[in-house]
Amino acid sequence: MGLVPMKTILSQAEEGNYGVGSFSVANMEMVMGAVQAAEELQSPLILQVAEVRLNHSPLHLLGPLMVAAARKSDVPVAVHLDHGMSTPVIEQALEIGFSSVMYDGSHHELETNIENTARIVQRAEKYGATVEAEIGRVGGSEDGSENIEMQLTSVGDAERMEKETGLDALAVAIGNAHGMYKGEPDIRVDRLREIKACTSVPLVLHGGSGISERVFQQCIGAGVRKINVATSTFNQVTEQVNDTFASKGAYQNYFDLHQDEVKGARANVLKHMNIFGSAGKASEVKMK
Ligand code: 13P
């Protein structure tokens, strides 16, 4: 089916009451692993890269690769810029062909966040791209460089954000944080339900690494449609490489290393697609 707008995938997930993983990738091997998992399970897929990761994975290199992988895939794939902070980077992603961008103005006052989000929604419209924004503030930080304190999303702010910006997907802060959790996170499913009751766009849960299967299911039941997963995939790739090294000793050639990276990414994506309920749903996603 190939590259599709993220909202097409999410509206089908809304209809079918399941979640779709948005998996962070950093190189070709991780892209290949994620796409292989999606094709094996016939699941829709969202591939993403965050702006803070672009110094490791430059957008002009990784971006076209992600788009090419999506176009060639036989399942619906959206390509998404995660935590876009600056307009030039968001514009660059749209020009490359990303079918979705997140504008993260969560560090601004509400008024500024709304104004900036509305502007990005207008810009994305001409590309037919989806826009996600964040209200409240997810804890931690995408690349682990800061320990941002979580600010719970207020229901009223979420309502205003939706009405005044025309955005397509809303990321909420309900006790979730980026990176691995120190203990069991206190995910406020009650607040999620309140937000869901007052908004109509698909809701997004960031900080997917380390949330239990039970809590994922509760969040999906309460209206979460997109779930971001980054750290656990990076960790699984590293573990796969370390395991081979520990059991077989030093790599004899680069291509075994390549294969282990693909395998590590694929395994984590498979696991989450099964938990989120998106396996087998690829054929239900229809372009409107
Ligand atoms: P994790 O690193 O906790 O999986 O979070 C991913 C994320 O939310 C990216 O925006």
Image (cartoon, rainbow, N blue to C red):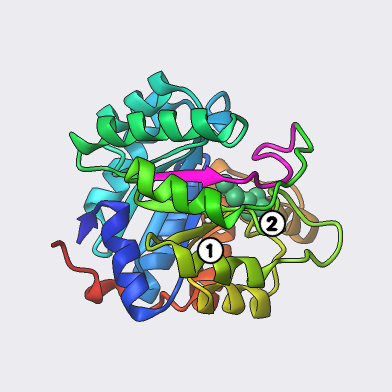
What secondary structure is found at the residue carrying circle 1?
A: helix
Write down the residue under mark 2.
Answer: 176
Residues 73 and 115: in front is 115
Q: Tell whether 221 sits left or right of 250.
A: left
**For the residues bearing labels 2 and 1, Cβ distance under 8 angstroms:** no
Q: Quadrant of the rendered structure where residue 236 is?
A: bottom right
The magenta span reads: 132-145
Mark 2: few, some, or many residues within 10 Å (few <14, many ≥20)?
many
Residues 80 and 163: in front is 163
Which quarter of the rendering shows the N terminus?
bottom left
Instruction: Name the residue at 40% across, 55% down.
Output: 46
Which quarter of the rendering shows the C terminus?
bottom left
Q: Amino acid at mark 2?
A: Asn
Residue 281, position as x, y percentages in the image: 32, 77
Up/down of 104 relative to 281, above or below: above
Residue 198, position as x, y percentages in the image: 46, 64
Write down the residue under mark 1.
Answer: 195
Instruction: Name the residue at 69% across, 56% down.
Output: 176
Up/down of 69 relative to 215, above or below: above
Q: Quadrant of the rendered structure where residue 282 is?
A: bottom left
Residue 135: within the magenta? yes
Q: Tell whether 237 sits left or right of 140.
A: left
Q: Assess mark 1: CB under 8 A from ligand 1?
A: no
What secondary structure is found at the residue carrying circle 2?
A: loop
Mark 1: few, some, or many residues within 10 Å (few <14, many ≥20)?
many
Instruction: Name the residue at 41% across, 34% down.
Output: 117
Q: Earlier in the sequence, mark 2 or mark 1?
A: 2
Q: Tell whether 101 sits left or right of 26.
A: left
Residue 190, position as x, y percentages in the image: 65, 72
Cα gap from disc 2 to disc 1, whole angstroms: 15 Å
